[in-house]
Amino acid sequence: MRTWRLPAEVDTDQLAPGATMKHGIEVTARHCLQTVRPGFAGEVQRGDVIVAGAHFGIGSSREQAASVLVHLGVAAVIAPSFSGLYFRNAFNVGLLLLSCPRAALIEDGEAIAFDARAATITRSDGAVLRCEAIPGFLLDMIDAGGLLPQLKLRLQAQETR
């Protein structure tokens, strides 16, 4: 997984610019992070990971700010801290967030691996960074692809009983 370094305090308008919101997720995604990391939307590949500074996702409560990253194929966002609203929106749409106090040690373009259930990140040099544990119900939500897919699975399971 390739990493993309971003600064602290990346806000929801940088992730999902307000002027693009009327056009839908495909158009909004093409403009994701254009003011912070020009070319990101066209170069990011499925499975890549964003590594950012503190307070990722500050700003409005628009869930599109997390949805664009899912649409672009981002596997996870690693940062020391996240906006509370962004945190909940991300898990609801199936975007994994890893709160890692030592995220600044991860370099741009570095190949990493992570284990969300163990709350660890393994760097290319073999160093292991510990993250805050993620509650099991949120990991289950990620595995299902977000809150709505998880609810659909539960309903299907109930219907088959």
Image: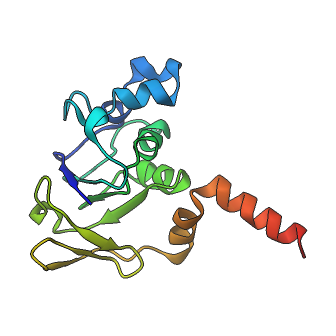
The x and y percentages for residue 157 are: 81, 70
| Image height of 91 relative to 21, above or below | below
The x and y percentages for residue 35 are: 21, 27
Residue under the image location 53 percent in, 25 percent down:
24
Residue under the image location 34 percent in, 77 percent down:
119
Quadrant position of residue 145: bottom right
Residue 62 in sight from this viewpoint: no
Left or right, 38 with respect to 19, comes to: left
The x and y percentages for residue 153 are: 73, 64
State which quarter of the image contains the C terminus.
bottom right
Quadrant position of residue 141: bottom right
Left or right, 17 with respect to 36, comes to: right
Left or right, 159 with respect to 60, comes to: right
Left or right, 110 with respect to 10, comes to: left
| Image height of 110 relative to 4, above or below | below
| Residue 75 vs residue 91, the one in the foreground | 75
Residue under the image location 16 percent in, 68 percent down:
102
Residue under the image location 46 percent in, 41 percent down:
71
| Residue 8 vs residue 15, the one in the foreground | 15
Quadrant position of residue 129: bottom left
